[in-house]
Amino acid sequence: MNKNKKIIIILILFVSALIFSYFGTNLWAQKQNIFQSLQTFSKILDIILKEYVEEVNTEDLIKSAINGMLNSLDPYTQYLTEEEYQDLKIKTEAQFGGIGIQIGIQDNQLTVISPIEGTPAYRAGIIAGDKIIKIDDISTEGISLEEAVKKLRGQPGTKVKVTIKREGVEEELNFTLTREIIKIHAIPYAGKIDEEIGYIRLADFSTLAEEELRNTLDSLFNKEKIKKLILDLRSNSGGLLQQGVSVGSFFLEKGNMVVKVKGRHPETERIFYVWEEPKYKNYPMIVLVDRGSASATEIVAGALQDYERALIIGETTFGKGSVQNIRPLDENTALKITTAYWYTPSGRCINKKIKKDSLKEKEFKKTYRTMGKLRREIYGGGGIAPDIYLPYPTLPKLITKLRQENIFFKFAVKYYSEHKELKLPVIITKDFLEKKFIPYLKEKKIEFKEEEIWENEEEIKRDLSIEIAEKIGGIKARYETLLKFDPHIKKATELLKRANTQEELFKIALK
């Protein structure tokens, strides 16, 4: 018996065993035609292997068949390869062995986007804009981002040599770095908007989210003495269910439901409640969301909206309201399978099943009522529709083009390398644009009309300020500069300044 036939027989036996073990004899009686389908599949596979015009890889064909089967279910049920399985573990565990840099491919070169504070790369002096031309003395020319990440990550305690080409420095720079456990912060920034209003950027729901949020709230309320809060969940794609429940519990009353999980079988139903009183309460709160807010983010936003604990501002969220369980297939691969949907306390299903774009609030036709005193009308239909719909402004063509080509980032790298004396805050003037930025665009052969610069003067000043600020003061300086220009922050701040209670906030915002 040849190798290909063995693989086919093993596949049939494996699938048959799964069917028997999972469905049981009763359901099996209803699925007698499965064997016929498997026989058809094996015949087609055998014919392809023998007669197709080119030689094919059996393993690749079977993987494609598996992926095709899973794609017919939903976007979140997936076969995880070894690399995908490891990436999922890193995202949920929020740590890995590495040197601590965010990288990207720019102008076909491996480029440092930002070093992570407190990591080996940060301590060694690697900076944003550095070009990584060699890893362990092997050229990175033509390397993919995935290959680069694989080379830079590794067991803590092992060493990796990185060769850098830096703007304004002629010779190559060599760094031999010892890998460490790199922790990805769930909260990259928190601070005060003004004397009374605090701001927290929660970027994901990894295992660190609960602890970091607890510490951040303690700092803002006890040390900074804030009285009002903006929780920024924009573009937070979510993470762990339990972290979503824990984060929601920081803001809700003891006994409140955070989320209900309900699947195909009765035993899958679970309800998650708040088990203790929140440490800080009775303060006005606004939550920011957008179409990139998903999963555990929607659990939090939905529960806070249902109980009238927070005013939701932004765009309708993504609508990824389902539970995925990881079923390891062997040591290196796994099946991620959807087993249940999430429901908010008012009964709204978070999951959006329809394929068409339904992100606009007007498409949310089914109505529900909040569970607080106001009994406000809210919308269901997949995702969380905000109380105040505030989409991002449409970007002018020139700004879109300059961002796509990373011009603001590249200019900031070059300008800071020539002006190490720069201090915060960054002030961009019209004279600066005329004498520094426009000549740079011409030098880089960027096609533009000069009147476009002045038509988009404020947007250009904003993007330059943000990028240069980060080069001077890191991620903290970036956020502090960004928030000054942010339309959602401006709206939230304006409303919070006029309200001293959550009930007042609703009356002001929704009148």
Image (spheres, helix red, strand yellow):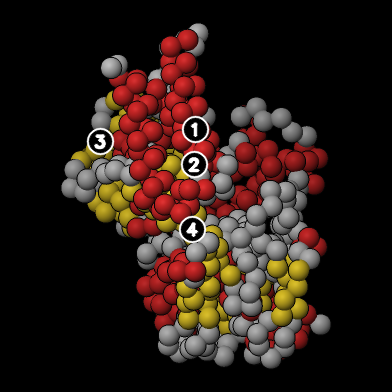
Asked if 14 appears above or below 49 in the picture, the reply is: below
The image's mark for residue 32 is 2
User: Residue at the spot x=26%, y=27% of the render?
Assistant: 137
Is the C-beta separation of discs 1 and 2 under 8 Å? yes
Which callout, 3 or 4, points to the residue nearer the camera?
4
Residue annotated with mark 3: 161
Q: Secondary structure at mark 3?
A: strand
C-alpha distance separating marks 1 and 4: 27 Å
Q: Nearer the viewer, residue 230 or 461?
A: 230
Label 4 crowding class (10 Å Cα cut-off): few <14, some 14-19, many 20+?
A: some
Q: Which residue is mark 1?
A: 36
Q: CA distance from mark 3 to mark 4?
A: 44 Å
Q: Nearer the viewer, residue 68 or 379?
A: 68
The residue carrying mark 4 is 339
Q: Amino acid at mark 3?
A: Lys
Find residue 235 and report its image quarter. Answer: bottom right
Q: Is label 2 in a helix, a strand or a loop?
A: loop
Residue 468 rendering spot, x and y as whole percentages? 54, 51
Task: Kindly report the distance in space between the C-alpha atoms of the residues bearing marks 2 and 4.
Answer: 24 Å
Amino acid carrying label 1: it is Gln
